[in-house]
Image (tube, grey):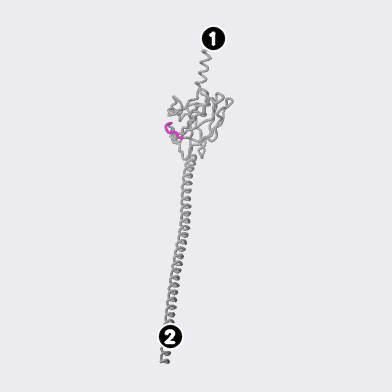
């Protein structure tokens, strides 16, 4: 009987270790002071801050982390188990409305260990997306950030945004947009200049080729005309020589005829 009770107690303790969370991020939504194991949640799509957490009633009473002008903020993650199950490596999502219904990915620039050898704490540095303006809470300047470790544990943190932080974050977004537009315009201008230069070069080459073709055509035309003139001159020379030969032939016949007539008269 005693052995059965001991085994049951051991089993319950083992289940408790699995049920209770293994890492929390401070300051946690709805938690006063430093969170303990029982304060850890399992954030999900349906419950981004954990099951049973009332965001509307706790966002204004929870300790908020102040965001810097560049949108960055720092929290602390503490694990209650070692190894991968007590991971201190997190991902983050932010809801600028503070209602917990419109989350977008946030950037984690300084993260924790995915499989720490022992329990402990580490600083987590994250940043709100460029252009984010927190509008949640009664003050209208709070964002809600959901942290989740690689082991699936975590909770939400409230981030407050001052006027300078909101202006700086909006300025960063404006600067990024302006930079992109300037880059696009510069690229378009460079492309137009390159196209114009290429077109001019192509046109010049085409003109040169056309000129060469024309010159070649004229040269060929002149050559053909010269050949025709030479052929005509040769034909004229041959005709003149033939006429002279015929005259000479007829002259010789006349001389012979005269000689025969004179000889006949003398012998008559």
In the picture, measured across the screen, residue 114 lies left or right of residue 235, that is right
Q: Is residue 212 above or below residue 170?
A: below
Q: In the rendered image, which residue does mark 1 sit on?
A: 3
Q: Residue at x 44, y 72 (%)?
A: 231
By secondary structure, the bulk of the magenta-drawn segment is best described as loop
Q: Earlier in the sequence, mark 2 or mark 1?
A: 1
Q: Image quadrant of residue 117?
A: top right
Frontmost residue, 161 versus 244: 244
Q: Residue at x 42, y 91 (%)?
A: 267
Frontmost residue, 257 versus 53: 257
Residue 232 x %, y %:
43, 73
Residue 10 x %, y %:
53, 14
Frontmost residue, 242 versus 155: 242
Instruction: Give the alpha-carbon distance from disc 2 to disc 1, as whole Å.
Output: 170 Å
Q: Is residue 9 above or below residue 238?
A: above
Residue 69 x %, y %:
51, 40
Q: Secondary structure at mark 2?
A: helix
What range of the chain is rendered magenta?
Answer: 100-104
Residue 213 x %, y %:
45, 63
Q: Residue at x 48, y 26 (%)?
A: 42
Q: Image quadrant of residue 224?
A: bottom left
Q: Residue furthest right?
A: 117
Quadrant location of the C terminus in the rendered image: bottom left
Q: In the rendered image, which residue does mark 2 sit on?
A: 256
Q: Residue furthest front?
A: 268
Q: Is residue 254 above or below residue 25?
A: below
Q: Residue at x 50, y 21 (%)?
A: 20
Based on the picture, tell me whether residue 150 belongs to the magenta stretch: no
């Amino acid at each position: 009987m005693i052995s059965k009770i001991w085994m049951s107690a051991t089993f319950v303790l083992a289940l408790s270790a699995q049920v209770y969370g293994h890492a929390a991020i401070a300051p946690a939504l709805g938690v006063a002071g430093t969170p303990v194991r029982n304060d850890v949640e399992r954030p999900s799509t349906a419950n981004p801050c954990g099951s049973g957490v009332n965001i509307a009633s706790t966002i204004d009473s929870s300790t908020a982390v102040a965001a810097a002008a560049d949108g960055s903020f720092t929290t602390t993650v503490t694990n209650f188990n070692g190894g991968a199950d007590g991971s201190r490596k997190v991902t983050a999502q932010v809801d600028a409305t503070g209602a917990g219904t419109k989350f977008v990915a946030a950037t984690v620039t300084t993260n924790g260990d995915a499989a720490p050898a022992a329990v402990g704490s580490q600083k987590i540095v994250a940043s709100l997306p460029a252009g984010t303006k927190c509008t949640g809470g009664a003050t209208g300047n709070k964002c809600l950030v959901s942290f989740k470790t690689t082991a699936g544990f975590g909770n939400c943190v409230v981030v407050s945004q001052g006027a300078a932080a909101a202006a700086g974050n909006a300025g960063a977004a404006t600067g990024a947009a302006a930079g992109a537009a300037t880059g696009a315009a510069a690229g378009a201008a460079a492309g137009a200049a390159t196209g114009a230069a290429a077109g001019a070069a192509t046109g010049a080459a085409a003109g040169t080729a056309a000129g060469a073709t024309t010159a070649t055509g004229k040269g060929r035309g002149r050559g053909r005309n010269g050949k025709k003139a030479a052929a005509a001159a040769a034909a004229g020379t041959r005709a003149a020589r033939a006429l002279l030969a015929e005259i000479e032939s007829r002259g010789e016949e006349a001389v012979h005829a005269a000689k025969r007539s004179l000889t006949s008269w003398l012998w008559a």
